[in-house]
Image (tube, rainbow, N blue to C red):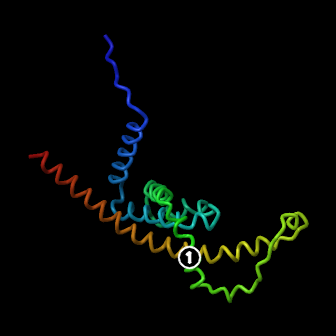
């Protein structure tokens, strides 16, 4: 006689896999510093994804590895940064902060309308104007990424230590 297996729905499987990966992350070698640093780097780099046109992903892996952070934690931090929509919400504020650090007076190029057919004739000034306008946003989002990365480092470190204390207390209670 064969035993029937209970089939789980997609959400149940997803939550189990998410929990399993979080447990693996909390028990990863390197401990709290590696996990916190990886999460902070992933979360901070997510802030500049929009302003760099996703080119930041070219340096994502090397940055995390050179800093000594955990890559899974960096990916989780990056995904959480995406899910919070913080980069989109902070965009107007980032432009203002970027103008504080790099005033418009330093960019002395008048903005004008560009026709796409100018590109076909070899006039690439549209890219120059786009880059100069986006420079303020990039600077502001870099500041936000730095600040939120530092904050998230300490938040993840706190939660990691709380989880570790809970796990050790549970293990001590089970051995009695």
- Foreground pick, 164 / 107: 107
35 to the left or right of 57: left
- Quadrant of res 156: bottom left
Position above or below: 124 against 84 = below
Q: Which residue reaches farthest bottom? A: 105
Q: Mark 1 = which residue?
A: 140
125 to the left or right of 93: right
Q: Secondary structure at mark 1?
A: helix
Give residue 134's position: percent from left, percent from top. 66, 73
- Residue at 60%, 73% (x, y): give it: 138
Give residue 83's position: percent from left, percent from top. 48, 56
- Residue at 41%, 38% (x, y): give it: 11
- How many numbered dots are placed on residues in this image? 1
- Foreground pick, 122 / 74: 122
Q: Residues within 10 Å of mark 1 (few under 14, many from 20)?
A: many
User: The N terminus appears in which quarter of the rendering?
Assistant: top left
- Quadrant of res 88: bottom right
């Amino acid at each position: 006689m064969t035993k029937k297996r209970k089939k789980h729905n997609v959400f149940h499987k997803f939550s189990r896999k998410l929990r399993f990966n979080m447990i693996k992350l909390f028990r990863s070698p390197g401990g709290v510093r590696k996990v916190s640093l990886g999460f902070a780097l992933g979360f901070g780099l997510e802030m500049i994804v929009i302003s760099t046109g996703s080119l930041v992903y070219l340096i994502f892996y090397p940055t995390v590895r050179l800093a000594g952070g955990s890559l899974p934690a960096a990916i989780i931090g990056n995904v959480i940064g995406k899910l919070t929509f913080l980069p989109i919400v902070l965009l107007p504020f980032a432009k203002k902060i970027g103008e504080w650090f790099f005033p418009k007076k330093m960019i002395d190029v008048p903005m004008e309308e560009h026709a796409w057919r100018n590109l076909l004739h070899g006039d690439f000034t549209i890219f120059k104007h786009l880059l100069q306008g986006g420079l303020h946003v990039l600077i502001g989002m870099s500041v936000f990424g730095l600040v939120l990365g530092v904050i998230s480092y300490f938040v993840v470190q706190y939660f990691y230590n709380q989880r570790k204390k809970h796990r050790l207390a549970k293990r001590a209670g089970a051995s009695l």
